Image (cartoon, grey):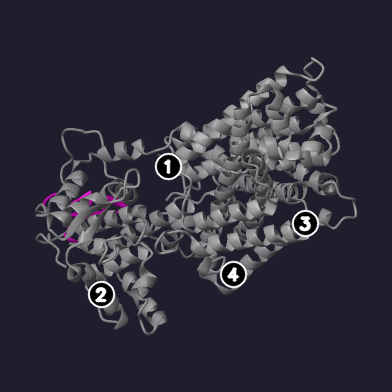
Amino acid sequence: MLADECWWLVHDDATGEPRVSLRAAGWVLAAALLGELLYSNRVWIKDDVIFPVWQAAPPDDVVSHAVLDQVKAESVRHPVRDWLAFLSGDAYGRVAGRLAGAGLVMARTSGVWPFRSVRFVPVDVKVSAWPFARLAAGLRHRQPLTQTDVFLTGLAQAAGLDEWLIRDAMHPDWTREYLRYLVSTLPEQQHLLLAHLKAAVANDLVSHRT
Amino acid sequence: MSVTGPPVMGPPVVGPPGTVRRASAVSAALSRNRLGMWPLVFVAMAGAAPLLVVAGSATTGFAVTGFIGVPVCYLAVAAILAVFSAGYTAMARHIVNAGSFYAYVSHGLGKAWGVGAAFIALLAYNALQVSMFGAFGVGASVMAATLFGWSMPWWLCALAGWALVAVLGVRRVDLSGRVLTVLLLAEIAVVVVFDVVLVAHPVDGQVSYAALSPVLLLSAGAAALLVGGLAGFAGFEVTTVHAEEARDPRRTVPRATYTALAVIGVLYGVSAWAMTVNTGPDGIVPAAQEYGTELFFVLAGPYVPGWLLDAGQLLFVTSLFAALLAFHNTVSRYVFALGREKVLPARLGRTSRRTGAPKFASLTQSGLALGVVVLFAVTGWHPITGLFFVGGVGGGFGVLLLMALTSVAVVKFFHRHTATESVWRTRVAPILAALVLTVILAATVAEFAALLNVPDTHPLRWLVPGAYALALVAGTGWALLLRATRPHVWAAIGLGADAAATTAGLIPDRFDETRTR
């Protein structure tokens, strides 16, 4: 699933340490959850507002199902930014729960109160390292990427991980150029979602919220 | 990667609206997270450090200028800022998400002026931040001497504080809102207690209101002191940055701004006055010259228990430290925002991947601060009357200049855009503010030598206004160069975080009247 792959991107593949701030991770995972619904044609975006597709079959996945139910339950339609803000609150926990339920991560608590923190350690590094390796290699060799991989690249870019994706490229400038080109080919709805995501993440920094 | 579920053929169709109208969970959750008035008031006051201003700036103002009108100046500054805020907060509703003076000037006066304003802001906030190292160093070394009996030069303490700020800044550690609020309330409590005992013990048994006389504002030197007073209010303008997060921003933001101004203004004014009551209007200047930043504690010393005095000393230092960190973060985020818009080198707009901190911007500010502190340590220039006062006045002058520019920008902005706000807020108040601020500005430039207590021919007299003139010219010039050579950078100036999206035409332009919350 898209949000799972996004989770692997924003966490260290071995230790499970977040690669970005938790607030940024929340934003990015919220966008990934919306992206899942967007790519499965269960929601659509028009004039900056998210609508559910009523006749679509419900998703098999519990988390995706719950998000769609939330979208459907609203009697008024909300702009993309509001959905991102709303979902960013618990997107992190939801995706972590989904991965834990699938046996892909193990929750590990460390530290003593009040500095206790929970980390989700990947069970299989082949799984956790795969999205990053795939995207980095695809970009490096300028191969065509699938639609969802391009969107995933866009998510990584919004989280500020783009430079890191092209870190090992032989020609970083070309690779960077290719990455930007790929992201620019995304359909309008996906593009809008990413634009809002980027603005939200950047806003946090500029207006002093961390 | 697989996408589950069968794709839907044909265009998506919106289903029938539910027959039962439910309250929106999204709106409820989002409005729960919105800020009410009091949280915003505390946000605005977080940059203001009451003990720093009362014990540091006010006493230094008395000592350096030899003028007793400091208390009435604080009250006057609060009143002027309130008039300024009427138009300033009205504009906040029209330019959401962009924040601060730079964006407002860009939208009101044009992008070239906007970049000029940004350069002025950088200079002013840097001056304010760096100047506080002087007071911090002295405050911390006095505290170390009284509490632990250690004797340390001021610059050693300042360097220790600098190192801490540099590390916390680049690690992106902000003091949490709760910690700041507790510190602020404790400071206010100490200041109020000291004020009460000072007023209760007037020098000849007679409470004198001489230092509060508005007539003092007409005398020579008053306009200049207003600038020093202004520095103590720096940071009040952040309420508008949070406009988008506020509950009912149209009412909440102005109210929070006025409330913060009233609280800060009265606190500063009354405290400065309380000191003159205790020493007598004639005694305050010599006393301030003798005791410097210690004066507030020395005066209250005989009437309050020792632990309270120690607590006050400690809070003076913590308040300074909080202000140092807050201003450091303000500057580095300002640089970061400019770097991201590529007005400054794009490198400055990069964040540390690990912490998300604006790393290069933070390091740049720290480097500058280190240079200045070391300069003062090596040359032996005075940390209070030199670094703290000149830097504070210099920074205050820049903030004044920014506010004057912003007022003109507000007038021009509402001249072009129709607005639902009252004529007072869109026309009268901004024009009045622009006029008053310009008068003060002119008077300050004329009296800069007196303000800094240097002879008329002293180079410092022209150094500060000259630096700002240079910043303005450099900023506008650079912007015009960008227009000629890099039009895409020019196009995004002043649009803030939504820049990338808005210039790409993706997010609908928000600067119109359609968006109401």
Instruction: Pinpoint the chain carrying mark 2.
Output: A
Disc 1 or 3, which lies upstream in sequence? 1
- Mark 4–mark 1 contact, CB under 8 Å? no
Element assignment for label 4: helix
Please state which of the two labelled residues, at mark 2 or mark 3, is closer to the viewer. Answer: 3
Q: Residue furthest front?
A: B149
**Residue on which disc 1 sits:** B245
Please state which of the two labelled residues, at mark 1 or mark 2, is closer to the viewer. Answer: 2
Disc 3 or 4, which lies upstream in sequence? 3
Real-space Cα distance between discs 1 and 3? Answer: 47 Å
Answer with left or right where residue A158 lies relative to residue B50. left
Instruction: Pinpoint the chain carrying mark 1.
Output: B
Element assignment for label 1: helix
**Residue on which disc 2 sits:** A133
Q: Are marks 1 and 3 on the same chain?
A: yes
Q: Which residues are magenta?
A: A39-55
Q: Residues within 10 Å of mark 2 (few under 14, many from 20)?
A: some
Taking depth in this image into account, of A86 and A11 the one nearest to the observer is A11
Residue B212 figure quarter? top right
**Residue on which disc 3 sits:** B380
Real-space Cα distance between discs 1 and 2? Answer: 38 Å
Real-space Cα distance between discs 2 and 4? Answer: 39 Å
Q: Are marks 2 and 4 on the same chain?
A: no
Can you give x and y, in whole percent of width and height, for residue A75 in the image? 23, 39
Q: Amino acid at mark 4?
A: Leu
